[in-house]
Image (tube, rainbow, N blue to C red):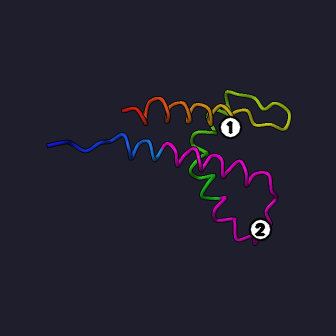
């Protein structure tokens, strides 16, 4: 009898979070009007990613117009996903 393999769902969640970070980055490049149909999606992306990004923003200062905390978060999530969650 084999037990439940936790690596697949955890790996999938980590990969999904990476995609959510990418979607937030891409949507941040485009100005949205208040009546845009994408507003609920942008709110969801902010709700899901802000708990990770907000503490990093307090530690890592922006470099001009670039939010380096996002880059750090992306790299950390990608490393944790590929090296830890997908190898359990």
Compare marks 1 and 2 and give the one earlier in the sequence.
2
Q: Is residue 66 above or below residue 12?
A: above
Question: Which mark is nearer the camera, 1 or 2?
Answer: 1
From the image, tell me which residue sits under label 2. 34
Identify the residue at image location x=65%, y=47%: 22
Quadrant of res 39: bottom right
65 over 13 or under it: above or below? above
Quadrant assignment for the C terminus: top left
Asked whether the residues under the numbered discs 1 and 2 touch, taking CB atoms below 8 Å apart as contact, a structural biologist would say no
| Relative image position of residue 12 (x, y in whole percent) | 45, 47
14 in relation to 24, above or below: above
**Quadrant location of residue 31?**
bottom right
Spatial CA span between label 1 and label 2: 24 Å
Name which residue lies at 47% across and 29% down: 83
Residue 30 badge = none
Residue found at x 62% / y 54%: 45
Left or right: 47 with respect to 30? left
Q: Secondary structure at mark 2?
A: loop
Q: Nearer the viewer, residue 41 or 59?
A: 41
Q: What is the residue that sits farthest to the front in this orientation?
A: 1
Question: What span is in magenta?
Answer: 14-42
Measured as percent of width and height from the top left, residue 51 is found at: 57, 43
- What type of secondary structure mainly makes up the magenta span? helix
The x, y position of residue 76, in whole percent, is 58, 31
């Amino acid at each position: 009898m084999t037990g439940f393999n936790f690596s697949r769902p955890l790996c999938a969640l980590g990969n999904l979070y990476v995609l959510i970070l990418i979607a937030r980055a891409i949507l941040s490049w485009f100005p949205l009007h208040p009546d845009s149909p994408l507003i609920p999606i942008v709110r969801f992306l902010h709700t899901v990613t802000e708990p990770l990004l907000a503490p990093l923003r307090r530690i890592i200062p922006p470099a001009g117009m670039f939010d380096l905390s996002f880059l750090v978060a992306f790299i950390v999530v990608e490393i944790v996903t590929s090296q830890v969650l997908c190898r359990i």
